[in-house]
Amino acid sequence: MFKKVLNTLITTNVSFYLTYFKGIIAEQEGIIMINLPRGTQDILPGESERWQFVEQQFVNICKRYNYQEIRTPIFEHTELFQRGVGDTTDIVQKEMYTFEDRGGRSLTLRPEGTASVVRAFVQNKLYGAAIQPQKLFYNGPMFRYERPQQGRMRQFVQLGIEALGSADPAIDAEVIALAMNFYRGLGLSSLKLVINSLGDQESRLSHKRALIDHFNPYKAELCSDCQVRLEQNPLRVLDCKKDHDHPAMQSAPKILDFLTVEADHYFTKVRVYLDAMDIPYQVDPNLVRGLDYYNHTAFEIMSEAEGFGAITTLSGGGRYNGLVEDLGGQPTPGIGFALSVERLLMALEAEKIKLPIDQQLDCFIVALGAEAELKAVQIQDQLRLADIQVDKDYSGRKMKAQFKAADRLNAKHVIIIAEQELIDQQALVKDMVTGNQQLIGFEQIVDYMKEVL
């Protein structure tokens, strides 16, 4: 009975119920079906090419700005993130995937990229390299245990950069410009850049005292997390999602009112550089970012595209002078940003931008008979060694079915080898766009395909 229903659903293409009944049948037949963990995704052929494209574009722009790639482990000692990201952050308190290895050491799947890059900077003594500042970029999966939703997964991919060793506000502007120009280069136009200054240590201490004085009368009305934050890191109260609409939030003291002369001058210079590059921005004194290590410049880039979703942030970053010291290094200024590939792809879809991905196959070899199969394997290998993309049939299908396979692969050319072609020592090459056909000697096929492609 179930198999009858299943066949009906296959013909009607009701995917949800199809999956449901497949599970029931599998359960009845004693088959254990293992699905992917919640908050993760399979990126299948057809979609993975979009990921490859945007990742390669990021590599290209980083090279233009003279950033070099760094690769760090997917898991680190838990203490790295406790000290680097901050004990008071939601990431450390609620979202990290932490486990003990067989030696009893506490390890954590990295929830973000900056702490790992700074750890590598210190451990590998990159501060002593001849070229300073060290300008680095990375690409890799991150892990946070949070409620999965569109564009926010438990395993997600971040692209990011870090510039370590310069306190020049010009490099703050460069980091922001790289991010903005990366998005623009992909065709995104509905972008909003928001910037703020979190000030130097003196500015932050003054602002911290003002925040405590302001929020203390409302402490009982705040969520339990904010009640703790008010004691440990009151700046993070401003970043709370639960209490976002509380009236006290709107009237809270602004960090810009507490900047020292030096911090205010620094922020002014960042804006001057952005103006010089014609990069529009808005100053938002409520922007604080979610990590403890930020100071001075902080920024976020958002999508204003219709239908993008309630969570508009595409990327964010800022300056983190002091983080290198916190992780055991010498005083070293730093700044960086990270972006989510998942949210980038959502923004491209919202703006209906099609990436220029060539999903055509250069050529497909149709072979009939055992001898033709042997010659096809030989020619296929020669073409591949010549950097030509080629495939063939591996199912022993007839010529018509092989041509259908070539169509499905969107092949530009088909090379046909059958009995007569073997006798004549030449293949029939068909242009699948124009329909033109030409006989080419086996020895000349590689040169011919190079020319027509």
Image (spheres, rainbow, N blue to C red):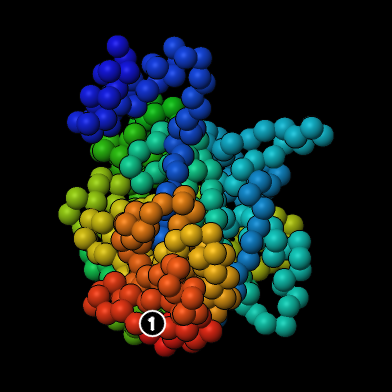
Front in this rendered view, residue 385 or 151: 385
Q: Residue furthest left?
A: 306
Q: Is residue 371 above or below residue 172?
A: above
Would you identify the image quadrant in which residue 277 lies?
bottom left
Residue farthest along the right direction in this orientation: 103
In this rendering, would 206 be left or right of 356?
right
Q: Nearer the viewer, residue 196 or 299?
A: 299
Image quarter hosting the N terminus: top left
Q: Is residue 289 visible?
A: no
Query: Left or right: where does residue 193 sit relative to residue 110?
Result: left
User: Dot 1: few (<14), some (14–19), or many (≥20) neighbours within 10 Å?
Assistant: some
Classify residue 330 by image quadrant: bottom right
Disc 1 marks a residue whose amino acid type is: Leu
Looking at the rendered structure, the secondary structure element under dot 1 is: strand
Q: Residue at x 54, y 51 (%)?
A: 141
Above or below, 127 against 307 in this view is below
Q: Is residue 438 visible?
A: yes
Q: Position of residue 249 (x, y in %)?
A: 31, 42
Q: Quick one: 166 or 17, which is closer to the camera? A: 17
Residue 276 in percent (x, y) is at 34, 85
Figure quadrant of residue 333? bottom right
Find disc 1 in the rendering and name its residue: 439
| Residue closer to the observer: 352 or 172 | 352
Report whether 301 appears left or right of 384.
Answer: left
Coordinates of residue 387 in the picture (x, y in percent)? 53, 77
| Residue at 32% in and 18% down | 3
